[in-house]
Image (tube, rainbow, N blue to C red):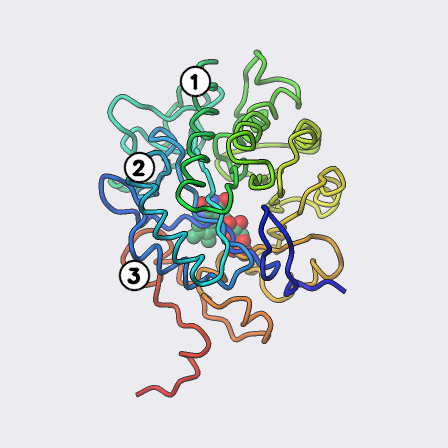
Amino acid sequence: MTTAFDPIDLGGSRLRNRIVMAPMTRSRAYGPGLSPTASTATYYAQRASAGLIVTEGTQPSAGGQGYPDTPGLHSAEQAAGWRRVTDAVHEAGGRIFAQLMHTGRIGHRSLLPDGLRPVSPSAVRPKGSVYTAQGPREFEEPQELTEEGIARAVEEHAAAARNAVAAGFDGVEVHAANGYLAHQFLAPNANLRTDGWGGSPERRARFAVELVTAVAEAIGAERTGLRISPGNPLGDIDEPDPEPAYTALLRALEPVGPGYLHIVETGERSLTLELRKRFAGALILNARTQGRLSGPEELALVEDGTADLVSYGALFLANPDLPERLRAGGPFNTPDRATYYGGDDRGYTDYPALETRRQPQP
Ligand SMILES: Cc1cc2nc3c(=O)[nH]c(=O)nc-3n(C[C@H](O)[C@H](O)[C@H](O)COP(=O)(O)O)c2cc1C
């Protein structure tokens, strides 16, 4: 029987286990250059016993930023910052993909360079508010992307993917989940377009298809992953019947052959299984847990063949040596929500590993 502790080949490299650190925004790329810091390198290297780390959402362009102090992958300075991270993870024997996250309408002009506004497939303002440096602000009406704007966004993702590989990443995950730009295209309540990028499920899926295709052409399909969250209402998304757009997406990606599909499961397991049937590459599952944090129970998803790999978010944030703790059945440090986004190294690089917990306190 295959277990989550068995190796697997993914993205052209051998992963030491099938336990993935899920992408998590930490908002600590301080400074005008929005580059990862030395602490970022420490944080990810501490978690290198994951089979694969997927980084926090990283903007492929200045206009793709939706939260304060999130790192980018569109400047030489950022690439140099990421090189320290990838070197530290590789030295510790780990593998790491960069998540490219363009937040689209989930943002605010105060987070963007002068003159830029959040963009989206259509000028539909999401309900809710966004966290800015000045505190929470209502979302604004986004600017509808022109066809040139769409082409530019696709090219920016490809350029960021090239930067990622130049910075030592093992691959790139395209973020089409959780209410951000590519998900806005997929969702009928955020995408009201009547041109080639809106309307039918195939046309709503087209932007995500173009992103994945461009990234795969830039860095190789096996090094390209895709994250989706069918039906996830985050960011004021409403997908009453998600299956057609997501099956259209996977059908269109068949000739491209991305290395993995990462599903954030918010709906029924039957949809996950249906999508898995339609995808030839590996499935990373971020399982739906209905309120509790994902934990040792999810390891069974690899054993029973539901998924090839399982990803952990909050528990990995709080437990740098999560695979070892999962193998032992715990104990687990409790994630501190107060230090999720921004702040200093507290709640970032100071969660203890098991050895240090076991050492007698002086
Ligand atoms: C602090 C925090 C930040 C997150 N940031 C991202 C992100 O940047 N990109 C993304 O795709 N998901 C993000 N997520 C969602 C996680 O990847 C994951 O899907 C979610 O936490 C559920 O998994 P879990 O129960 O194992 O935590 C974030 C989650 C947390 C807790």
Question: Can you name the residue that lies furthest to the top here?
Answer: 195
Callout 2: helix, strand or loop? helix
Left/right placement of residue 324 relative to residue 352 reads right
What is the quadrant of residue 80 in the picture?
Answer: top left
Measure how far apart labels 3 and 1 are at the Cα level. 38 Å
Residue at 40 percent of width and 33 percent of height: 60
Callout 1: helix, strand or loop? helix
**Nearer to us: label 2 or label 3:** 2
Q: Amino acid at mark 2?
A: Ala
Q: Position of residue 160 (x, y in %)?
A: 42, 34
Q: Position of residue 311 (x, y in %)?
A: 57, 55
Residue at 46 percent of width and 44 percent of height: 98
Q: Amino acid at mark 1?
A: Gly
**Nearer to us: label 2 or label 1:** 2
Residue at 69 percent of width and 29 percent of height: 255
Q: Is residue 130 visible?
A: no
Q: Which mark is residue 149?
A: 1
Residue at 46 percent of width and 22 percent of height: 124
Q: Ligand 1 closer than 8 Å to the CB at disc 1?
A: no
Q: Position of residue 129 (x, y in %)?
A: 38, 37
Q: Position of residue 175 (x, y in %)?
A: 51, 38
Q: Which mark is residue 157?
A: none
Q: Are marks 3 and 1 in contact (CB under 8 Å)?
A: no
Q: Earlier in the sequence, mark 3 or mark 1?
A: 1
Q: Which mark is residue 345?
A: 3
Which residue is disc 2 drawn over? Answer: 76
Q: Amino acid at mark 3?
A: Asp
Left/right placement of residue 297 relative to residue 304 reads left
Measure how far apart labels 2 and 1 are at the Cα level. 23 Å
345, above or below 261, in the image = below
